[in-house]
Amino acid sequence: MNKIPVIAIDGPSASGKGTITQLVAEALGFNYLDSGALYRVVALAARQKGVSWADADALANMTEMLDIRFERGAVLLDGHEITDEIRTEEIGKGASEVSAYPQVRSALTVLQQEFAQAPGLVADGRDMGSVIFPDAAVKIFLTASAETRAERRYKQLTQKGLSADYQAILQDLKLRDKRDTERTTAPLIKTADALLLDTTQRTIEEAVEFVLDAYKKYINFSLSH
């Protein structure tokens, strides 16, 4: 049994990972890691510093120097809050691009693993269970149909007063799925020991209960062995 229990939740864009991960972390009193936010921070920092999203080595060198912190739901870069800035569709595309580079992923690996602190961690991303926390106590592969995910993202943006185009979002999600699943380094995959959670027809509450139940079963199994 791991000293620090980790619940790894992986899945494609807009599958509800972030919301579900936060709610599970709150329910258990665990720490929370939004690994996707880290790649969004890298994409935003590159824009701010004039580093091309296509320059893998320069991105990796820049990433190693970044001061990234999560504080009470806010994301900080070099001491400045950038929570809303990293949530634009453009930065989301950039995050998908920069995350494909092995050099960038390597630069962020140690940082992500350092989030595993007592009493436990709930981490969401694309490779939490496959690469970053291969010995996670519980692994969840969260998914939903592309149409459902595009609809959720569309509502999310319009509710914030931002302009959004459903068809453009749907097309972008499909492109991101292709890039995430086909990249050579840490592709988005469901590991053999991960539980499949399809949220197409499930509410957020049902999904959270599914994850909590899986963790309870892990605890009960560990105590009995």
Image (cartoon, helix red, strand yellow):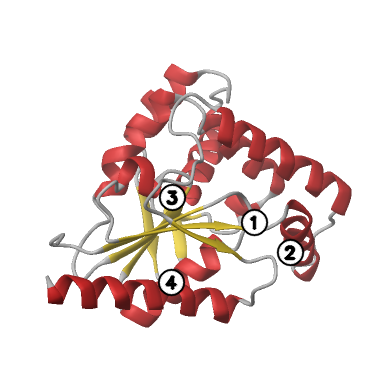
CB-based contact (under 8 Å), mark 2 and mark 1: yes
Give the mark nearest the N terminus, 3 or 4.
3
**Mark 2 sits on what residue?**
152
* Closer to the camera in the image, 3 or 190: 190
Q: Residues under labels 2 and 1: Cα distance?
A: 7 Å
Q: Residues under labels 1 and 4: Cα distance?
A: 18 Å
Name which quarter of the figure residue 221 lies in: bottom left
Q: Amino acid at mark 2?
A: Arg
**Mark 4 sits on what residue?**
211
Of labels 3 and 4, the one closer to you? 4
Q: Say which residue appears at 47% left-offset and 25% top-offset.
A: 101
CB-based contact (under 8 Å), mark 4 and mark 2: no
Give the mark nearest the N terminus, 3 or 2.
3
Q: Say which residue appears at 80% left-offset and 41% top-offset.
A: 171
How packed is label 2: few (under 14 Cα within 10 Å), some, or many (20 or more)?
Answer: some
CB-based contact (under 8 Å), mark 3 and mark 2: no
Q: Position of residue 30 (x, y in %)?
A: 30, 72
CB-based contact (under 8 Å), mark 3 and mark 4: no
As helix, strand or loop, the secondary structure at mark 1 comes to loop
Give the mark nearest the N terminus, 3 or 1.
1
Residue 13 relative to residue 39: left or right = right
Q: Is residue 31 above or below residue 60?
A: below
Q: Amino acid at mark 4?
A: Val
Q: Is residue 15 above or below residue 175?
A: below
